[in-house]
Image: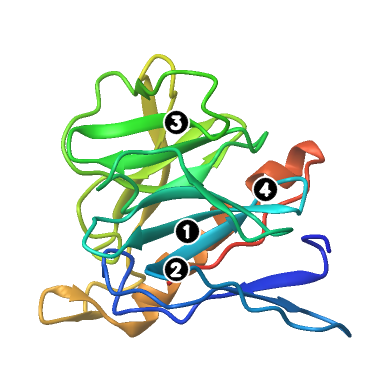
């Protein structure tokens, strides 16, 4: 199994912050091959990302009567190990080397080591809820506002220093393309295209882009 030939299926809820989630996760081969359903009793899954070894996933999931958090899932035996506190990771992204995760928390953005060999670090000069849309070689991509479909700026933030600059500004091609105070359908599609394309920026340095699931 490798990320070049396998995608990830998760039956989505109503959005990335929907705590209901799906009762299973299912790697689906793009070409010939068998599917495999992974379930843990009492768990609900929201979304997932491949790790570079193609043997593990990072998943956002929750146990019964608990808030969602991020887990490392081993595909060989289906075991899961939590590496963030509850309530962390409404939006999140893997580091280019696949060793850390930048995750939105109530106080800002936290960087967590997947292996647990480093203490969590808070990104300086970032406070309040954030929308993390990617992590590229140059830093974190963070939407400048609570609603990524409302258009505006995507910031490039250094996870060590907190220094920021505008990575891209997303504007509707025509101001009339708004519906009830929000961007129209074409503009929202443009936002999705920009956010999805951001995941492939690391390929410019020769690294393989990750396969992702966006709920």
Q: Which residue is mark 4?
A: 51
Separation of residues labelled 1 and 2 (CA atoms):
5 Å
What numbered label is drawn on residue 192? 2
User: Does the CB distance between marks 4 and 1 fall below 8 Å?
Assistant: no
Instruction: Give the quadrant of residue 88.
Output: top left
Seen at 34% across and 60% down, the residue is 62
Q: How is the image coloured?
A: rainbow
Q: Residue furthest left?
A: 180
Left or right of 77? Residue 155 is: left
Measured from the top left, where is residue 82 in percent x and y? 44, 44
Separation of residues labelled 1 and 3 (CA atoms):
22 Å
User: Does the CB distance between marks 1 and 2 fall below 8 Å?
Assistant: yes
Mark 4 Cα within 10 Å, few/some/many (few <14, many 20+)?
many
Mark 1 Cα within 10 Å, few/some/many (few <14, many 20+)?
some
Tag nearer the camera, 3 or 2: 3
Mark 3 Cα within 10 Å, few/some/many (few <14, many 20+)?
many
Q: Nearer the viewer, residue 151 or 69?
A: 69
What numbered label is drawn on residue 195? 1
Separation of residues labelled 4 and 1 (CA atoms):
20 Å
What numbered label is drawn on residue 182? none
Q: Nearer the viewer, residue 38 or 210?
A: 38
Whether residue 134 is visible, yes or no, is no
């Amino acid at each position: 199994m490798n990320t070049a030939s396998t995608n990830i299926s998760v039956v989505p809820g109503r959005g990335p912050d929907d705590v209901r989630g799906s009762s299973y996760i299912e790697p689906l081969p793009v070409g010939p091959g068998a599917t495999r359903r992974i379930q843990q009793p009492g768990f609900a899954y929201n979304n997932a990302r491949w790790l570079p070894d193609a043997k593990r996933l990072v998943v956002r999931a929750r146990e019964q009567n608990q808030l969602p958090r991020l887990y490392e899932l081993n595909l060989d035996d289906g075991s899961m190990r939590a590496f963030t506190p509850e309530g962390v990771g409404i939006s999140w992204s893997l580091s280019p080397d696949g060793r850390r995760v930048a995750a939105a928390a109530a106080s800002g953005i936290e960087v967590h080591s997947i292996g647990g060999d480093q203490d969590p670090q808070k990104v300086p000069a970032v406070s309040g809820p954030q929308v993390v849309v990617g992590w590229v070689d140059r830093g974190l991509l963070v939407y400048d506002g609570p609603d990524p479909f409302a258009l505006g700026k995507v910031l490039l933030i250094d996870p060590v220093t907190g220094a920021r600059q505008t990575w891209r500004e997303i504007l509707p091609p025509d101001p009339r393309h708004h519906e009830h105070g929000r961007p129209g359908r074409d503009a929202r599609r443009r936002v999705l295209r920009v956010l999805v394309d951001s995941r492939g920026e690391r390929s410019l340095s020769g690294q393989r882009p990750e396969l992702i699931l966006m709920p």
